[in-house]
């Protein structure tokens, strides 16, 4: 009897279920339109019902979101531990490398001290410097020169080296009370003893008012190639050895040209350094103001 009753109920419900499946979209659309109309007609009631529904579901959503937030925090903490472990390994390796370099430096310092004691070598004088701002690109007898805001009152002296953040740019040739003039290494009157690395070939860097100065007095068949680094040689008392100047940009039949490390047309600040030398980029009597044709007769092309 019970099975017959269940079968009768199913037979009666089948048409209703088919009707619901066939017209479900239309019914949902009508319900949505009805809710919109009710919301427009009485917004206070709709907002109240919506607020009650939100209040009812908020604890449930909070209960479900708490484990998810805890899991997210745990995953983030695990990722942080992995990152910290990797960072710790990297710092440990760097510390070991720095310790090795420290030991090597201490050995070299001890060896250097011992050799200086054997040779009775005098230490280089302590260098001092003044930072100055470039205020003008002056002309006149010095075609490639700069005016900076540091002078005799700041301890600037004639012959001091002018350095930028990348290397040598020139030398102080005139000193006033409040300002100084720097002769750039590209000027026609500038001469600077240099060394070409890695062959250690000695030469003289000579300017000709071009953006790239030349290498003069190179030995015959000197092993100079494009890209070779050029540094000061320390000869003549001009500057200490090893100060960066530029790189070889051209080496061919027309000679050897050097591209300075610093863009000399965009210098804003320089350091005027006193290395304790007595030389200068030009003679003590100042630069010779002669026609370019006459000056170039006695120089290498």
Image (cartoon, grey):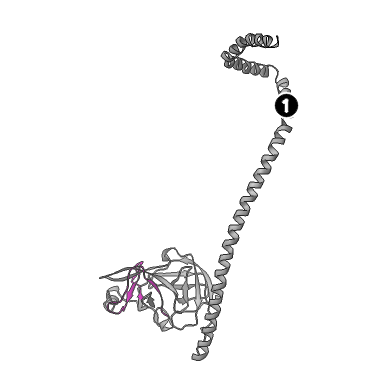
Whether 211 is drawn above or below 232: the answer is: above
Q: Say whether residue 192 is visible.
A: no
Kind of element beneath mark 1: helix
> At 61% across and 13% down in the image, what residue appears?
17
Image position of 156 (left or right of 8): left
Closer-to-camera residue (154/57)? 57
Residue 93, percent from left and from top: 56, 65
Q: Position of residue 186 (x, y in %)?
A: 37, 71
Q: Residue at x 61, y 50 (%)?
A: 79
For label 1, the residue is: 51
Tell me: residue 80, above or below residue 180.
above
Q: Provide residue 278's location: percent of width, then percent of height.
A: 46, 84
Between 11 and 270, the one lying in front of the other is 11
Q: Give the overall secondary structure of the magenta segment.
A: loop
Q: Is residue 265 left or right of residue 22?
A: left
The boundaries of the magenta stretch are: 205-233
């Amino acid at each position: 009897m019970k099975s017959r009753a269940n079968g009768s109920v199913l037979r009666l419900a089948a048409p209703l279920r088919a009707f619901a499946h066939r017209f479900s979209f239309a019914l949902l659309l009508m319900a949505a339109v009805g809710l919109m109309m009710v919301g427009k007609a009485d917004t206070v009631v709709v907002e109240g019902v919506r607020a009650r529904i939100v209040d009812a579901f908020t604890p449930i959503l909070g209960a479900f979101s708490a484990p998810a937030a805890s899991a997210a925090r745990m995953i983030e903490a695990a990722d942080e531990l992995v990152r910290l472990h990797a960072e710790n390994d990297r710092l440990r390796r760097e510390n070991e490398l720095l310790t090795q370099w420290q030991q090597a430096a201490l050995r070299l310092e001890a060896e250097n001290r011992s050799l200086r004691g054997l040779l009775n070598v005098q230490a280089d004088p302590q260098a001092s410097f003044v930072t100055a701002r470039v205020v003008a690109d002056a002309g006149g007898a010095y075609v490639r020169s700069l005016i900076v805001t540091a002078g005799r009152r700041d301890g600037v002296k004639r012959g001091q080296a002018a350095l930028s953040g990348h290397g040598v740019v020139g030398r102080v040739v005139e000193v006033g009370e409040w300002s100084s003039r720097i002769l750039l290494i590209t000027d026609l009157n500038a001469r600077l003893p240099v060394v070409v690395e890695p062959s250690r070939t000695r030469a003289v860097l000579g300017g000709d008012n071009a953006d790239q100065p030349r290498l003069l007095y190179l030995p015959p068949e000197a092993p100079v190639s494009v890209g070779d680094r050029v540094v000061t040689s320390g000869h003549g008392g001009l500057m200490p050895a090893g100060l960066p100047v530029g790189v070889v940009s051209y080496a061919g039949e027309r000679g050897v040209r050097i591209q300075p490390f610093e863009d000399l047309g965009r210098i804003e600040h320089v350091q005027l350094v006193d290395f304790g030398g007595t030389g200068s980029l030009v003679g003590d009597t100042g630069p010779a103001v002669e026609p370019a044709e006459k000056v170039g007769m006695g120089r290498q092309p």
